[in-house]
Amino acid sequence: MLLDAVLNVGTEVELASTLQHVVDSAADLTDARYGALALAGPAHGRGPERGRGRIAELFSVGLSEDERRRITRLPTGHTGLLGHPGSTLSLGVPVRVNNDVLGYLCLARKRHGPFTEEDLALLRVLASQAGIAIGNARLYGTARQRARWIEGAAAVTTALLSGEPAADALTTLAKSARILAGAAAGVVLQPTDEGGMEIVAASALDDPGDIVGTSIAPGSPVLVQLLGGEPVYIDDSATDPRMTTHVRTRFGPSMMLPLQSGGRLIGTLALPRKRGGRPYTSVDRLLATQFASQAALALVLADAQHDRERLAVFEDRDRIARDLHDLVVQRLFATEMMLESTRRRTGEGELADLLGHAVDELDSTIQEVRTTIFALQQPPADAPASLRGKVLRETAGAAVLLGFQPSVHFTGAVDTLVGDPLHAGLLAALRGALAAAHRRPGVTSIEVEVDATARLPGGRDGVRLVVSNDGEGEADNEGEGDGDGTGADADTGRAGSSVVWEAER
């Protein structure tokens, strides 16, 4: 009968049914009226006795629901199932996994006589089988858990390399880690210029709005440990003195894992659970740490991929700009010269007027193409938001075709006084003036002046753009007005020329 019981234990698939079968077999083989297998709860507090006595799961035979509820402390067999001394009326043995006592298998009230040494030996065998079943279930659970973390890391890597915006990528990382860890929140922090760290992305079961933007001050013990490349494990975020953020009060067990690349801390992944939540096990910590290492590598690869894509776009735009300048503009200009020469030979008349109109159209087209060439020299993304930055970006792009860097001067608080609605008109006038200067022969220097304190006719407050160059010949009117802008005026009374654009602010 013992062999059958042991073999039957090995055939059960689910752990709960396996442990229940152990209790049933133990009671049947020993002729016991009552039987129970009690597993201890998770560890709490500190020291080797933490968590002892609390029951997490109870499998029984012969006990009523009321009697089951009366078993509140872990039975060992020495005090009886219901907590009363039973001497030879009770029998109990520990259930072990890797020398750790996880619970007890107990029997009580043998129907015919006291328990014997043979009963004790049989109970030990069944307790051993229960320990094996629990150990196997743990290994299987760990393997499944590891597989989920590996799949999660692969999914995060794919998402980060898919080209989505950086903020969305970090949120994806935070959400995936939160789900895998069973945490209340997933948080990504990045270093600040002041030497601290700030939460830049968060995913939470509740609204994470008040989490993003939270900072860890420079010199914090937690930060010192993270900067050293060491993870931080916290039993209770709400009471741990190392935690200083205002959101700590809602969280309990937590992991803070450094995201490193080449020995440099590029961020931190924090995974706090709710207050009173299940503590992280050593397996949880190991798998989360490995996930963080993979995520850090994915972040670095995503940044490198983004840089390569940006470089490819820059190179492509630069190639298009060169082709437009070297092929299209030159051919259009040659055609314009041929038409102009033909017009002069035809003298006055309708044909001459038509040819003059064609020359003007070609000239306009050439100017538009040149303006497009300058625009193509600008970065396609991450453009500056301030007017000062936009003007500097335009002149830097023009320098590629001009062969020299235009000088730029600002008067007044340009970014504060000049509103966004005026930016487009001013920049369009600037591009046109730079393109016109590039067309003129003998241009070796260009000066760009933006005056945010200009006085317009009638005493109105305005902004004025002046683009001057030292080229030869007559200038073209290339500026553009916008809103209340006055358009452009070419000053040709001296060597070189200037283009002026004005608008009321």
Image (cartoon, rainbow, N blue to C red):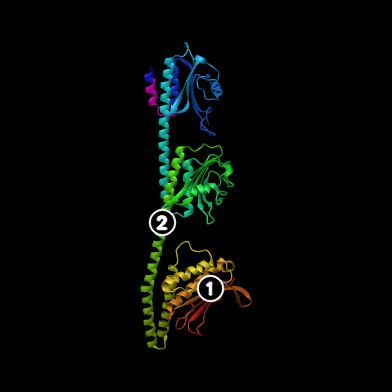
Q: Compared to 231, does 32 lie above or below?
A: above
Nearest the camera: 393 or 234?
A: 234
Tell me residue 307's x, y (percent). Answer: 42, 59
Extreme residue toward the top, this view = 113
- Disc sitting over residue 304 in the figure: 2
- Please tell me which residue is depicted at 53% across the width and 46% down the height of the picture: 222
* Type of secondary structure dominating the magenta stretch: helix
Left/right of residue 152 with respect to residue 54 in the rendered view: left
- Give residue 205's mark: none
Amino acid type shown at disc 2: Ala
Q: Nearer the viewer, residue 360 or 69?
A: 69
Q: Position of residue 409 (x, y in %)?
A: 53, 73
Quadrant showing the C terminus = bottom right
The x, y position of residue 188, in whole percent, is 50, 49
Callout 2: few (<14), some (14-19), or many (20+) C-alpha neighbours within 10 Å? few
Q: Is residue 162 visible?
A: no
Q: CA distance from mark 2 to mark 1?
A: 35 Å
Q: Secondary structure at mark 2?
A: helix
- Residue 380 screen position, x and y as percent: 45, 63
Instruction: Tell me the quarter of the image containing the N terminus.
Output: top left
Residue 13, magenta (yes or no): yes
Label 1 neighbour load within 10 Å: few <14, some 14-19, many 20+: few
Q: Nearer the viewer, residue 493 or 187?
A: 187
Residue 438 vertical position relative to residue 174 in the rendered view, above or below: below
- Residue where numbered disc 1 is placed: 409
Q: Which amino acid, mark 1?
A: His
Q: Which residue appears at 42% of the width and 35% of the height?
A: 141
Residue 279 in view? yes
Q: Quadrant of residue 314?
A: bottom left
Callout 2 touching callout 1 (CB < 8 Å): no
What span is colored magenta in the figure?
5-15
Determine the secondary structure under disc 1.
strand
